[in-house]
Image (spheres, grey):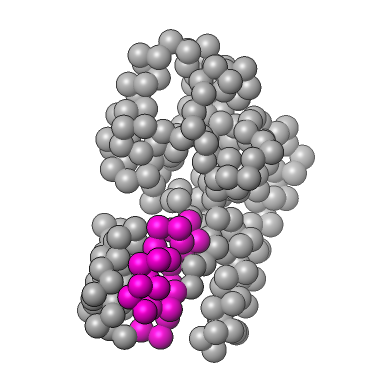
């Protein structure tokens, strides 16, 4: 089975049974399919683990909070499903593209970055422990939020103003058009934002949800290239 998604999935999955959204899978449909294992992401483990256990379904929660952890999971999946050679090749290709970006940015001045994750009606601050935070770090940016164990924090605009980042990145999770509109309204009506250097210098960027999701994916190299352009304004 595959998750129900508004995003375009590879054609080979066109006739595969849909099992509901990643955040709210239909356990009855999944049970009828009798899978050996259900694959989900670690970010959803707290919400889904009990439900899968109650439905007597074995679930593996994969850590896609960074490119490095995704590559570890790719290696594990290759071993589990007898695709070691394919997994190794995939990881080698990813590493080559990632290292090219690292090399280009290694001698550039590190910009300070604030990342906001918007959901309809509110927004959170993204730490370096989340996937987008990992992309910023790899691309040579310095997250103004440091020494945190969690992926997301509640926003405190006064504290953020004191951090005064060079760049503000605004990401959307679900309903991106509505979230961008919310961000625009927040930045227009909350006077605090106009004091940020990033706002004064027009260094506020909205991230494309198709490239910059909540978890790592195989389009990470393309996301890194876009991140590099934004961080160094090129």
Is residue 93 shown to the viewer in this render? no
Q: Nearer the viewer, residue 154 or 145?
A: 154
Q: Vertical placement of 87 versus 49: above or below?
A: below
Instruction: Identify the residue at horizontal 44%, vertical 38% (top origin).
Output: 117
Q: How many numbered discs?
A: 0
Instruction: Identify the residue at horizontal 33%, vertical 75% (top origin).
Output: 55
Q: Vertical placement of 63 versus 27: above or below?
A: above
Q: Vertical placement of 106 versus 145: above or below?
A: below
Q: Is residue 38 left or right of residue 14?
A: right
Q: Nearer the viewer, residue 87 or 161?
A: 161
Q: Is residue 55 left or right of residue 63?
A: left
Quadrant hosting residue 28: bottom left
Instruction: Identify the residue at horizontal 40%, vertical 58% (top origin).
Output: 47
Residue 227 drawn at (x, y percent): 55, 43
Q: Quadrant of the C terminus?
A: top right
Residue 146 is one of the magenta-drawn residues = no
Quadrant hosting residue 73: bottom right
Is residue 42 shown to the viewer in this render? yes
Residue 86 drawn at (x, y percent): 56, 81
Instruction: Identify the residue at horizontal 59%, vertical 84% (top origin).
Output: 79
Q: Quadrant of the N terminus?
A: bottom left
Residue 82 drawn at (x, y percent): 54, 89
Q: Vertical placement of 35 versus 131: above or below?
A: below
Residue 23 drawn at (x, y percent): 34, 58
Q: Which stretch appears magenta?
A: 35-59
Furthest residue to the bottom? 82
Q: Nearer the viewer, residue 192 or 148?
A: 148
Quadrant hosting residue 189: top left
């Amino acid at each position: 089975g595959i998750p129900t998604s508004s995003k375009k999935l590879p054609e080979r999955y066109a006739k595969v049974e849909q099992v509901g959204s990643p955040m709210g899978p239909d356990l009855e449909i999944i049970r009828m399919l009798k899978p050996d294992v259900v694959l989900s992401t670690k970010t959803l483990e707290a919400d889904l683990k009990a439900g899968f256990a109650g439905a007597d379904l074995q679930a593996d929660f994969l850590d896609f909070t960074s490119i490095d952890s995704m590559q570890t999971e790719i290696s594990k999946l290759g071993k589990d499903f007898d695709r070691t050679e394919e997994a190794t090749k995939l990881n080698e290709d990813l590493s080559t593209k990632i290292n090219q970006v690292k090399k280009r940015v290694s001698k550039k001045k590190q910009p300070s970055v604030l990342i906001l994750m918007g959901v309809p009606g509110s927004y959170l601050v993204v730490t370096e422990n989340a996937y987008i935070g990992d992309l910023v770090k790899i691309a040579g940016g310095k997250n103004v939020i440091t020494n945190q164990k969690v992926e997301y924090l509640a926003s405190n605009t006064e504290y953020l103003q004191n951090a005064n980042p060079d760049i503000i990145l605004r990401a959307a999770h679900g309903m991106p058009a509505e979230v961008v509109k919310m961000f625009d309204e927040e930045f227009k009506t909350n006077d605090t934002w106009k004091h940020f250097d990033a706002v004064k210098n027009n260094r506020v960027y909205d991230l494309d949800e198709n490239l910059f999701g909540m978890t790592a994916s195989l389009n990470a190299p393309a996301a890194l290239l876009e991140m590099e352009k934004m961080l160094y304004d090129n």
